[in-house]
Amino acid sequence: MEQPVNPPQSLRFGVFEVDLQAGELHKSGVRLKLQEQPLQVLIALLRKPGEIVTRDELRKNLWDADTFVDFEHSLGTAINKIREVLGDSAENPRFIETLPRRGYRFISQVTVSSPAAPTAAPPGDSDPPRGRHPRTATSQTLRRRGVWGVAAVLAVAVLAWGIGRRVRAGGSLSPIRSIAILPLLNLSNDPQQEYFVDGMTDELITDLAKIGELRVISRTSVMPYKGTHKSLGAIAGDLHVDALVEGTVLRSGNRVRVTAQLLRASPERHLWADSYQGDLTDVFSLQDRVARSIAREVRVALTPEEQARLTSIQRADPEAYEAYVRGRHYASQINPEGFEKAVLNFGRAIELQPRYAQAYADLAETYCWGVATQMIPAEEGLLKARQAAMKALEMDETLGPAHNSLAWVKYTYEWNFLDAEREFRRALELNPGASWTLLWYGMYLAQGNRIAESTAEMKKVQQLDPLSPVANTLALAPLLTGRKYDAAIEGGRKMLEMDRGNGLARWFVTTAYEWKGDISKTIDIQQETAVLYGESKEAAAQRFMRLRRAYYSLGAPGYWRLNLEQHQSEWKKNPGDPYEHAVLYARVGEKDHLFAWLEKAYQARSQGLILWLRTDPAFDPWRSDPRYTDLARRVGFPR
């Protein structure tokens, strides 16, 4: 192959550039300090991107023969210095990959720049400012592993240069309106720092979700990509976003360094990168600086209120912050063990920093989820949620999660519908991209039979949290309450295809079959669920055979009558929600018992009563009864 007429002037990767003539490493035009030996090692790797550069090759080319004894130590030191300057990690490399006992490989895209003969620029075009360079628009920009040879990179870079010039000449790129913050990488060697790093990811998502013009993918949908080798382009496609942010966190004692880079998905382009350093006591300010920078780079216009929300003056107690991010980690698991550890860690954070408003707000949401998933009794959990939410709002009225929790308490415990809706709306005003708030508000609307409004909110949830099993299952609520049973069943079945053990999806499918009146399918999925959750096939077959026989001989009334008898037997041992008893009496047509148990549900402030009475078809024959209308009036249901 013929050699280029002109030798390369520089080698570029991401926001970095090696000036080969000056022998300098630059970042966004700013010179970085890197000693001669590490710089030569970096250049050797950059000249062969995607290829293995062996240890022996590096020794022969860069070390004198008489330094062989010190070579291993010297090479290791050089690689460590390069990684430190680039913000790279051996465990999760973005630039330099180690191949044990063999050598190293540069895994990011490299663009080679050579001096070219002067050519006439197209009308209206101009050179980029000094220190800033056109970004290549290749698929490799959005990959985490590169295997392109130098010749291929040069060819595509030339093509991309032409594309870039055409974009500038023909008009600006389409605005970025959706973004995903990928899990930040932990550059420390301490696995215990994963909590801290995940917490930084979480906080960055929360901050950006406060911007009304920007759709920010929720935590539960980005965390599955932690440690993935999937290309960034494919991830952007999965999540249907315009751009991605990836970065690293390095914590050393109470010092924190965060690097972040912004990548457009289509056309594929590296847009921006920067690093931020600060003391752990200023971690909130550090997070806000990163969020404001991203907002600036995607050219989103912030309202004065949004600007204020992204300007933190609070200082953090390092131990309290550590406990808080652990609490966030455990709370996201939504299981009994996670619930207990979340409450413990939020409590620890508050003990160390008594005016930790955000910890109170997250504690309130945790208690609400604990009640919703029956990990704590409703009255106990909702009273604690109210107490924590009120405490948070006393210190900071702008905390959306606290308003969200207070809304759920006012709805399900206080039965104050007017104030509940006001709190939901305030929460969304403060944090329009909060998927949990949208989800709870959507549930509130669905259970109030406001189907069109609920459907609109649930569509937003699915856009923000496309991979969350909980969010996508609960988003079926308006289909169920709107009596679109086949659609609810289809949606629930899709969720079960992804996870057979999704108990929430099983409840939705079972309930949809029941409300539809397809008792045979109802029994089928109940039996399947019993076996999945540990009952032997023989025992389950025998137990559900009784229900099948009752249904085959007497139809739906026979099925419901046997259900009632079994329920009465269980209640003698373990009394539950009286609303469930009322549903069964409604199904068998025993009106007096039905209203007697609804009254008991009212006195017990039943969760089932407030959530499902208005939409369960079991009560359709009785809605004109004066006792029903009187109960609805006393509960305070909006007309």
Image (tube, grey):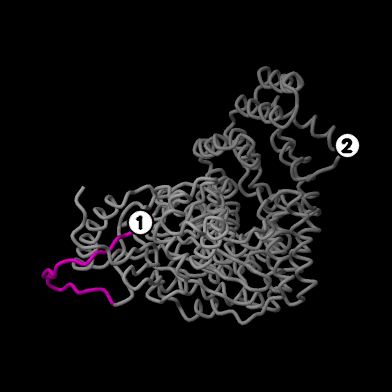
* Image coordinates for residue 354, horizontal then vertical, percent: 77, 76
Secondary structure at badge 2 equals helix
* Image coordinates for residue 473, horizontal then vertical, percent: 57, 45
Q: Which residues are magenta?
A: 109-129
- Near mark 1 (Cα within 10 A), the count class, few <14, some 14-19 or many ≥20, is some
* Image coordinates for residue 234, horizontal then vertical, percent: 41, 48
| Residue drawn at 65 percent across, 80 percent down | 314
The one nearer the camera, 225 or 122, is 122
Q: Any mark on residue 572, and which?
A: 2
Q: Is residue 329 left or right of residue 216?
A: right
Q: Is residue 579 visible?
A: yes
Q: Any mark on residue 47, and which?
A: 1
Residue type, numbered disc 1: Arg
Q: Any mark on residue 224, and which?
A: none
The alpha-carbon separation of the residues under discs 1 and 2 comes to: 78 Å
Q: Quadrant of residue 244?
A: bottom left
Q: Is residue 117 magenta?
A: yes
Secondary structure at badge 1 equals loop
Q: Main secondary structure of the magenta part?
A: loop
Residue type, numbered disc 2: Lys
* Image coordinates for residue 414, horizontal then vertical, percent: 73, 63
